[in-house]
């Protein structure tokens, strides 16, 4: 399940996929008709969203990507660790 929530943790959109589907293509479907200011990925699944194509599309649209980099990334990139703590809003919804 891929979920977009607002700043209060209310669901804006849900995308259900099978377990074999990769995470990053689903992010585009989540933000298709609206433009969030920030894209925060939930822990446990978040590193799957660390894909060049997604990050490029997100930043091109002026969205801040708060997604931890994959450990095997050749060039580790920075992300806002303080803002990443706001992922609890996603966790409240899904748990």
Image (cartoon, rainbow, N blue to C red):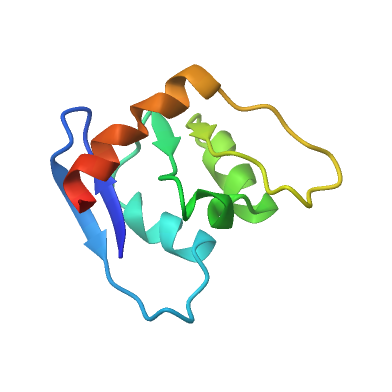
Q: Is residue 4 above or below residue 66?
A: below
Q: Is residue 15 rendered to the left or right of residue 69? A: left
Percent x, y of residue 17:
35, 76
User: Residue placed farthest to the top in the image?
Assistant: 82
Q: Which residue does the image show at 45% across and 28% down from the upper left?
A: 84
Number of numbered discs visible in the structure rendering: 0
Is residue 48 or residue 92 the one in the foreground? 92
Percent x, y of residue 11:
16, 47
Percent x, y of residue 64:
50, 29
Q: Which residue does the image show at 61% across and 50% down from the upper left?
A: 50
Q: Which residue does the image show at 54% across and 53% down from the upper left?
A: 49
Q: Is residue 19 above or below residue 23?
A: below
User: Residue placed farthest to the right in the image?
Assistant: 74
Q: Quadrant of the N terminus?
A: bottom left
Percent x, y of residue 54:
58, 51
Q: Is residue 16 rendered to the left or right of residue 74? A: left
Q: Which residue does the image show at 50% across and 49% down from the upper left?
A: 46
Question: Quarter-wise, where is residue 9 in the image?
Answer: top left
Is residue 57 or residue 49 the one in the foreground? 49
């Amino acid at each position: 399940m891929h979920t977009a929530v607002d700043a209060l943790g209310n669901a804006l959109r849900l995308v259900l996929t099978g377990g074999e589907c990769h995470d990053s293509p689903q992010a585009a479907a989540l933000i298709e008709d609206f433009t969030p200011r920030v894209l925060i990925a939930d822990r446990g699944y978040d590193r799957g969203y660390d894909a060049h194509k997604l990050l490029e599309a997100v930043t091109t649209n002026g969205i801040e990507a708060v997604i931890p980099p994959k450990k095997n990334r050749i060039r580790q990139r920075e992300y806002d660790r303080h803002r990443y703590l706001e992922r609890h809003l996603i966790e409240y919804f899904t748990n």
